[in-house]
Amino acid sequence: MAGNIFSDLPFLQTIQSPKLINPKKSIKGPLTFYTIKNPQKGSGVMCIEFVFKINYLGILHKNSLIPYFSNQLLNSGSFNHNELEISQKLQSFGAHIKFETNRMYSVISIYFISNQIKPVLSLISDFILSPTYPAKVIKDRVDNEKKEFLINIERLSIQSRLLIKKTLYGEGHPYGRAIIASNFDNIKSEDLIDFHTDVYNNDNLEIIISGDLSEDILDVVSIYFSKINAPSANYISKEKHVFDNNKNILLPPFNDAEYIYVGQDNALQTAFRIAKILPGPDHIDFFALRILVAIFGGYFGSRLMTNIREEKGYTYGIGAYLIIEENYSELHIVTEVGEKYTKLVVDEIIKEMEKLKNQEMSNEELEKVKAYLLGSLLHSCDGIFNQAILFRNLKKHNSSFQYIDLFTDEIRSINTAKIKQLANKYFNVDSFSFVACGPPERKLW
């Protein structure tokens, strides 16, 4: 008798919730630590992330490039080493360093073999705590980035991205202010030193350590970073002043919806940005909204991709995503299309919104999206270092790993009726701002 033809197929099982290692919080002297220790013997690699909350001094700074360059150029020189020496020493230690700056945080992440911890910490504490920002290095780096900016600003996709921010927030809001070329001309070494003095102090620093950690890891790090400057009265008064004077413009509602088209000579394509402000992580609808956005345009099998790319071939790619802030989120729909498809794509985007509002989706489609989202969550939590990055990103909007549990619960429980209800609540076309940059003769609205 023939054997079972299915006997050699792999076993299929439901995607389970991610297994997360909750960071251990410790306070040692002036320093706050979060440690995520590899439960199994690994490769000996570890990561330390220094997370400085730059707060409202960064958001409301008259030149938004100052917070960026103050972080990016920390390793341009210290009192003990110049830029080349820092780079060569990091290479000799086998260390990899990254600098990230966003609206509220500056992050320095360094990956290295744990047996190199003392020389690595000795070096990086030197330039993180006492950077000199040499004038010649600063000028060369800023000039190079200005040249890159002037090239990029000609791209329609960049123009539309900057314009949608201005449209969402208005010119009076710090998030609505676009970077202009003259911002690069006004950056001096003294400005970076002043900003570093104001912001890089212990009340703003949290240290996240992950990987293969020794038992005395906190003692070792404290040796090099406990000498960090204490917050000055000047910093505290500045912080309070800028926040108190501007707190009303930092929370929604912001601008009313607008329709803006910018024509550019010789443009062959149109870059779209369609966006609106949505609730943030504390809102009862937030996790369900993340699922709705995924269905609409958040993965390769989404409504927008299936219709506009796969079936009609109007564009190589189109998508929708959320930018999550502490108290709200931004929904963006983004694509670039050829001139002759411009109006057709706008019409199809609106049609897909209306379909979600008027027609209940199939259970089969919803289950596919659920599987994708659960798989993405598992991927984002795969490994100690990914979990540390996830934890750090969640802290930006005052969340913890409970966020993952709540999101997982919503994914498993949501039904097609709720998706339709949410679409009707949030997908009112008149509430979206439409921005497009393309050929001058095109008029879309």
Image: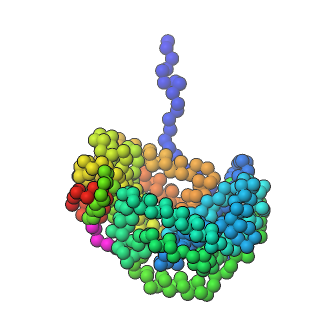
Query: Eyeballing the image, is 128 above or below 303?
Result: below
- Looking at the picture, tell me which residue is in the foreground, 135 or 316: 135
Q: Which residues are magenta?
A: 254-258
- Looking at the picture, tell me which residue is in the foreground, 163 or 236: 163
Q: Position of residue 88 (x, y in %)?
A: 72, 58
Query: Eyeballing the image, is 197 above or below 394?
Result: below
Q: Give the side of residue 399 with respect to residue 47, left or right.
A: left
Q: Position of residue 307 (x, y in %)?
A: 30, 44
Q: Residue drawn 75% across and 70% down? A: 80
Q: Give the side of residue 373 with respect to residue 201, left or right.
A: left
Query: Eyeballing the image, is 395 above or below 42?
Result: below
Q: Position of residue 171 (x, y in %)?
A: 36, 75
Asked if residue 127 shows in the view, the reply is no
- Looking at the picture, tell me which residue is in the foreground, 329 or 169: 169
Image quadrant where one finds the C terminus:
bottom left
Magenta highlight on residue 157: no
Q: Residue drawn 45% across and 67% down? A: 325
Q: Give the side of residue 312 with respect to residue 25, left or right.
A: left
Q: Residue drawn 56% across and 63% down? A: 100
Asked if residue 393 shows in the view, the reply is yes
